Image (cartoon, grey):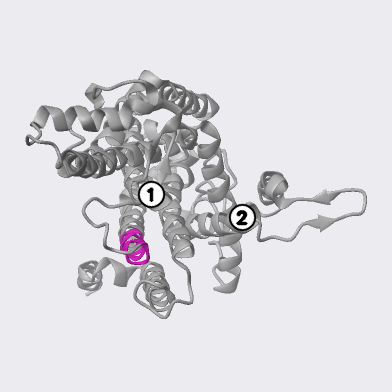
Amino acid sequence: MSDMAVDMGRRRPFVVRHPSVLIFLAALALFTVGVTILAEGFGIGVISTSFVKTLGKTLCLCLVALAMDLVWGYCGILSLGHMAFFGIGGYAIGMWLMYARTELIVIESLAAAPLPPTPQEISDGIATQIFGVVGASEFPAVWAFAHSLPLQLAAVVLVPGLLALVFGWLAFRSRVTGVYLSILTQAMTLALSLYLFQNDSGLRGNNGLSGLQNLPGLDQVPQSVVSMWFFWASALALGLGYVLSAWVVSGRFGSVIRAIRDDEARVRFLGYPVEAFKLFIFTLTAIIAGIAGALYYPQAGIINPAEIAPIASIYLAVWVAIGGRGRLYGAVIGAAFVSLLSTWFTGGQAPDVNLGFYTISWVDWWTVLLGLSFVAVTLLAPKGIGGLIDLLTDRVSPDRHGADLGPEPGALREKEADR
């Protein structure tokens, strides 16, 4: 009878067996409906279009924070390069957006010519328009598929995934761990950003890709409507990403990656292919980050190499730490909280503080405040904001008996697996 009950439990939908996932999806749906009703595009106009874009970008940052929590909070890999994958996704979709819109402009400008333009003339005109700012007039090889939306969408997934697969395979097979792996991921990010800053990188150097908020062929559609489209897409991606992440960390697979985080040597001794588990998580989270970037930058309107600088990945780790590492909802809360607070402080909305002898301008001091918050959370509240959610929901940790089975305070302990 008990076996039958177990089988019936397993047949229930995943979200039903995990109420926290259902609660998150319901809260996200309620938030999406509320913004839709209050926005300018389809609602009563209480929320401005610019703030809708801010909310949409925040949802994308929550998605990449989920990826960071999977690879760091659950698998124990402190990657300081995941915003590189985020930026690659943005560049991939940005190339098509810029190409398609420039193509329409060039065709319209050549329409008045005595003779119809040839495909080569159109191609040359597009290249001159895009790369004239860096003194070039030909398409680099990296733009070979920029004319095709399906191929560029495939690149959003494949390029970050392949880069993470190759990098992870080289790093994990050499058993590079801990701070050394973090340094390697940071070095990869720095090398990529420095390369993209060069004008001959094929991606317009420091100028980056701009005008991404203008969808080709939809000039008559107001930005208030376009912003809502991207907001809905971002909310859908976050919801699907949360379900996927919750599914990954549940069951036996989730137990194995937590064990790798807590005591990698012991898991390897038990016969598990540790490198394969780590490579899967690293690659999967890179793909999630690429998708988040592809949704983020059309709402931001521009992408340049500064977005891929190592500091961006460090900020990502700070968001997850503040929200609560090892808690999916904590990563979302941390990213949303810091992103919106950053917008308020750096957007000039926070009032300056006059101390008499000195005036604190939050535009200049926001990063200092963020750093102090990270230190305070690390020392005083290691569970982050997610720990407060645990207190509100009366969630308690299981009674632990016996000695630690791992190097961290959260490591698996004796008899815990029976609870």
Q: Residue at point 41% right, 53% down?
A: 60
Residue 281 seen in the figure: no
Dominant SS in magenta: helix
Q: Residue at point 38% right, 71% down?
A: 32
The tag earlier along the polypeptide, 2 or 1, is 1
Amino acid bearing label 1: Ser
Q: Residue at point 33% right, 37% down?
A: 91
Does the magenta-highlighted stretch encompass residue 231? yes
Distance (Cα) linking label 2 and label 1: 42 Å
Residue 387 left/right relative to 207: right
Element on which disc 2 rests: loop
| Residue in front for this viewpoint, 189 or 275 | 189
Q: Quadrant of residue 400?
A: bottom right
Q: Quadrant of residue 166?
A: top left
Image: 272 above or below 418: above
Classify 10 Å Cα crowding around label 2: few (below 14), some (14-19), many (20 and above). few
- Name, please, the residue furthest toward the front: 114
Residue 3 left/right relative to 174: left
Rendered location of residue 354, percent (x, y): 85, 56
Q: What stretch is highlighted in magenta?
A: 223-234
Element on which disc 1 rests: helix
Amino acid bearing label 2: Gly
Query: In the rendered view of the protein, which quadrant contains the N terminus?
Result: bottom left
Rendered location of residue 126, percent (x, y): 23, 33
Classify 10 Å Cα crowding around label 1: few (below 14), some (14-19), many (20 and above). some
Rendered location of residue 337, percent (x, y): 56, 59
Image: 350 above or below 365: below
Q: On residue 347, which mark appears? A: 2
Q: On residue 255, which mark appears? A: 1
Does the magenta-highlighted stretch encompass residue 198? no
Residue 38 left/right relative to 291: right
